[in-house]
Image (cartoon, coloured by chain):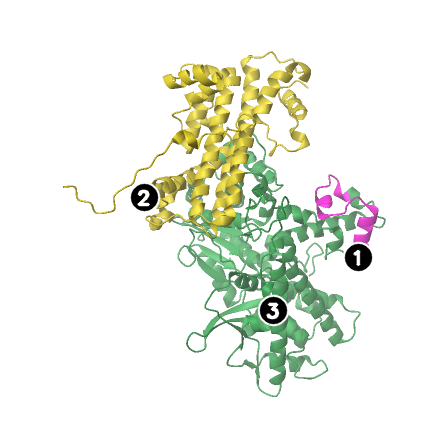
Chain colours: A yellow, B green
């Protein structure tokens, strides 16, 4: 006889397909950075509820890191599609049979194949982000500016908090305490994570800094690398170079963060031309 | 003999030459104790409001250590220009890293300065390449202009400079010059406008503490936020430079006057000098200023009018300085206003109390605020502003029965004098009688009050932060440091304080005469502090004003710079 110590469980009918029905993704229309902003804004608006409902803080933490992950995933797969050097870097990577099948039968989009390359990747840590930049785009961590690496270090702290929230319902474990600075955190081991308005604010600011800096850095890096690699014959006249230039410009341009005359395509193109010594 | 090249009136130790620092130092017992603390092993915080002699003390200790082989190797650095790095907080994600590196580079440059001074006897071999040193100088110079050069040299500096690296170099120098210890004198470390940097600074401070290496930092009183890692009392001891013990201070200030102004030139009656000593509230810079003012008001014959004018000028100056916090920290505007009302109320209460004591043999200069069971952070902040500005001198807590504790303060005595608190109901001006009153013993207990009873309901409800609304949806903010609006999700704009300072109109500069202000505003393109300091040829622009020549333009520029320094320090 099976010994029961609590009530018996009931039957549940759960069709996960219904979770996705009639909710098409907006990814196609927005640049990755605008997609990030759209997602993080939703998180920001929840901030006011944290005072009355503190658990919301943990959910905003998860949502914020997820918004960063989504940015990297979308951006990298779009880079693989438009950038020849990145494409070259990925030619040897393996792909799941299911991903190829979906692409042939349903989407027929090369972006989806590229995204399938990232299926096994997580971007919820500094290490993972740096590895992906190296494996899919060909950037070594030594090339990154200090401003970005310092911000990724802050982001790493956010990821450790996320780890507590996801795996321990917010309780700080020893491993996370060691990573966060054992000297100041050891006394907090076993304590519950409490994310208030100020903490959310800082978390969102760190995530947004990661995105702003990465977006600026990758645009500068890729477009300059393209000149060195001779994949395109630049004429240094916007009328001739427009199509190629706009592929990169549109990928990184943000309706929200580039809302200033100095970020218009023509201005940036002129700066690019000057930086390459073609005034 | 009077040397025409020396400014005997100079009240800021930053601008005094080494020789004068040594000559003008008054070695009272208190001073000797503080000097010993500075030179002795162990980390120290030297606290005192502006003008109490922190810089003087540090520079004196530095000179003594340089010239005595048995004393520790000294390194003196001033962080007064930290505010130039403040705009990075809103424009660079790695602002704290840049600040951290700047703090250490300043120490490297300070070490190099000490090596140069010590090398007159015995030259130290090259410890750092010229190229590297020039890179550091450039980095520091750029940072102090609010600029970070995005190039490989700067990136490399950010990567290479760290505390252990600095410790190694300090040790090499200690070995070479055969100094057993090293003291790092970190002046102007109050960094009041940038709490973000303050926390980072004290983290660096704590990590600088090592075997035979002890940092000493000068801070303002009332600073309580030393960051999560530094434990005051354990990691570093606090020493207070600001003392208002009348008897000892009288000797100290009189001696300062004698040394600075050379007694034969001091045409001030003894009793007036004593009154000025008390009115300066233990702050030597104020005392020097007052004497300077007294001597320059020769046209006023009446001693009373002359004295009253000084009291009035300085009370205006102290109020202006206190109110200037509103401009620096706009979110505390209402709190600063209520703080001033509280201060005035205390002055009235103590003046009345002294009027009642006029026939007795005691005086009352203490106010005691009843301590509430629940700490009110903003109320405490309000009192801290009054302490920082030197308007309240903290005298610690006293207990009056079970669960009744009072936090005691002495308000600036100049304001009590202005209210004729010590004139014993007399209408005339009798310095000796005033001095007799002030020298009486204090009553046994302070005037005990609840802060709430000294303010009306409107004032009490004004003890709150003034936070700007969201520029997108006009929603109120939840907290002081909020970066994103919780209503519409938009990024909130927090303007840099440095930039706010640059926007101050020339018309608002208290240090310029009305004539000069009008000339500048009407006849030149300079309208704000920023226009002047960022102008490529400020002197030529100023001289467009008719009547402003080389000397005046230089003076205006210097005064504006010193105003900015005071404003942001």
Residue B149 covered by magenta stretch: no
Chain to which the residue tagged by mark 3 belongs: B
Figure quadrant of residue B164: top left
- Which secondary structure lies at badge 3? helix
Q: Are marks 2 and 1 on the same chain?
A: no
Magenta highlight range: B513-539
Q: Are marks 3 and 2 in contact (CB under 8 Å)?
A: no
Sequence-earlier tag: 3 or 1: 3
Crowd class of label 2 (few under 14; some 14 to 19; many from 20; radius 10 Å): some
Q: CA distance from mark 2 to mark 1?
A: 65 Å
Q: Nearer the viewer, residue A49 or A236?
A: A49
Crowd class of label 3 (few under 14; some 14 to 19; many from 20; radius 10 Å): few
Q: Are marks 3 and 2 on the same chain?
A: no
Can you give x and y, in whole percent of width and height, for residue A31 in the image?
Answer: 56, 27
In this figure, which residue is indicated by the disc labeled 3? B457
Mark sitting on residue B514:
1
Can you give x and y, in whole percent of width and height, for residue B281 in the image?
Answer: 60, 69
In this figure, which residue is indicated by the disc labeled 2? A174
Identify whether B97 is placed above or below B228.
Answer: above
Crowd class of label 1 (few under 14; some 14 to 19; many from 20; radius 10 Å): few
Residue sitting at x 49%, y 30%: A22
Mark 2 or 1: the one toward you:
2
Identify whether B133 is placed above or below B182.
Answer: above
Chain to which the residue tagged by mark 1 belongs: B
Chain to which the residue tagged by mark 2 belongs: A
Identify whether B93 is placed above or below B81.
Answer: above
- The kind of secondary structure the magenta stretch mainly shows is helix
Mark sitting on residue B179:
none
């Amino acid at each position: 006889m099976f010994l029961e110590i609590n009530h018996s469980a009931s039957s549940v009918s759960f069709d996960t397909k219904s979770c996705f029905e009639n909710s098409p993704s907006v990814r196609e229309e927005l640049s990755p950075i605008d997609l990030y902003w759209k997602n993080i804004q939703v998180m920001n608006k929840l901030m006011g509820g944290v005072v009355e409902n503190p658990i919301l803080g943990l959910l905003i933490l998860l949502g914020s890191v997820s918004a960063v992950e989504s940015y990297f995933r979308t951006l990298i797969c779009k880079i693989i599609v438009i950038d020849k050097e990145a494409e070259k870097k990925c030619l040897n990577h393996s792909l799941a049979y299911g991903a190829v099948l979906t692409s042939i039968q349903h989407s027929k989009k090369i972006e989806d194949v590229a995204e399938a390359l990232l299926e096994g990747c997580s971007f919820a840590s500094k290490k993972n982000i740096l590895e992906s930049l190296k494996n899919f785009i060909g950037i070594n961590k030594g090339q990154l500016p200090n401003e970005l690496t310092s911000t990724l270090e802050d982001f790493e702290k956010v990821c450790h908090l996320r780890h507590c929230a996801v795996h321990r319902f917010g309780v700080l474990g020893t491993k996370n305490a060691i990573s966060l600075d054992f000297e100041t955190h050891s006394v907090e081991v076993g304590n519950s994570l409490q994310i208030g308005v100020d903490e959310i604010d800082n978390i969102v600011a760190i995530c947004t800094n990661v995105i702003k800096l990465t977006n600026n850095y990758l645009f500068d890096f890729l477009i300059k690398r393209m000149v060195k690699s001779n994949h395109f014959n630049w004429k240094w006249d916007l009328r001739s170079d427009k199509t190629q230039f706009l592929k990169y410009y549109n990928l990184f341009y943000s309706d929200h963060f580039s809302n200033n005359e100095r970020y218009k395509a023509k201005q940036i193109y002129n700066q690019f031309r000057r930086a390459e010594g073609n005034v | 003999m009077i040397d025409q090249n020396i400014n005997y009136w100079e009240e800021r130790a930053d601008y005094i030459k080494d020789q004068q620092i040594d000559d003008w130092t008054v070695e009272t017992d208190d001073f000797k104790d503080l000097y010993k603390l500075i030179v002795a092993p162990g980390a120290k915080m030297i606290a005192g409001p502006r003008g109490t002699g922190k810089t003087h003390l540090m520079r004196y200790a530095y000179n003594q250590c340089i010239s005595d082989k048995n004393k520790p190797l000294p390194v003196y650095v001033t962080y007064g220009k930290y505010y130039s790095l403040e705009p990075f907080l809103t424009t660079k994600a790695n602002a704290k890293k840049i600040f951290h590196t700047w703090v250490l580079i300043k120490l490297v440059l300070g070490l190099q300065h000490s090596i140069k001074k010590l090398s007159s006897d015995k030259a130290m071999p090259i410890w750092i390449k010229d190229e590297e040193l020039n890179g550091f100088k450039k980095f520091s110079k750029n940072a102090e202009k609010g600029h970070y050069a995005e190039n490989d040299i700067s990136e490399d500096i950010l990567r290479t400079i760290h505390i252990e690296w600095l410790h190694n170099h300090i040790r090499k120098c200690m070995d070479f010059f055969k100094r057993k210890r090293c003291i790092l004198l970190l002046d102007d470390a109050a960094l009041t406008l940038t709490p973000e940097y303050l926390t980072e600074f004290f983290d660096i401070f704590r990590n600088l503490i090592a075997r035979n290496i002890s940092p000493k930092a000068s801070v303002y009183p009332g600073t309580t936020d030393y960051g999560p890692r530094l434990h005051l009392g354990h990691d570093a001891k606090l020493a207070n430079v600001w003392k208002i013990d009348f008897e000892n201070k009288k000797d100290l200030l009189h001696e300062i006057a004698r040394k600075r102004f050379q007694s034969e030139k001091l045409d001030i009656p003894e009793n007036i000098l004593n009154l000025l000593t008390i009115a300066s509230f233990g702050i030597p810079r104020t005392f020097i200023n007052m004497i300077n003012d007294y001597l320059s008001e020769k046209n006023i014959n009446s001693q009373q009018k002359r004295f009253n004018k000084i009291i009035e000028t300085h009370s205006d100056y102290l109020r202006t300085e206190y109110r200037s916090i509103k401009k620096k920290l706009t979110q505390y505007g209402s709190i600063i206003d209520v703080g001033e009302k509280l201060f005035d109320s205390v002055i009235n209460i103590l003046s009345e109390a002294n009027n009642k004591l006029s026939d007795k043999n005691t005086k009352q200069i203490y106010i005691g605020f009843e301590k509430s069971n629940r700490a009110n952070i903003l109320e405490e902040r309000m009192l801290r502003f009054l302490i920082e500005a030197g308007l309240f001198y903290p005298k610690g807590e006293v207990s009056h029965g079970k669960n009744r504790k009072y936090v005691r303060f002495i308000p600036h005595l100049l304001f009590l004098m202005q209210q004729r608190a010590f004139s014993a109901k007399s209408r005339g001006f009798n310095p000796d009688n005033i001095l007799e009153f002030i020298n009486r013993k204090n009553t046994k207990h302070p005037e005990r009050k609840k802060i709430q009873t000294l303010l009306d309901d409107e004032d009490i409800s004004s003890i709150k932060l003034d936070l700007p609304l969201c520029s997108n949806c006009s929603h109120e903010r939840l907290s002081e440091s909020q970066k994103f609006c919780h209503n519409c999700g938009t990024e909130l704009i927090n303007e840099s304080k440095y930039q706010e300072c640059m926007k101050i109109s020339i018309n608002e500069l208290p240090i310029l005469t009305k004539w000069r202000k009008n000339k500048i505003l009407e006849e030149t393109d300079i309208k704000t502090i920023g226009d002047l300091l960022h102008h490529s040829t400020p002197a030529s622009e100023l001289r467009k004003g008719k009547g402003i020549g080389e000397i005046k333009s230089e003076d205006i520029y210097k005064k504006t710079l010193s105003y900015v320094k005071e404003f942001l320090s």
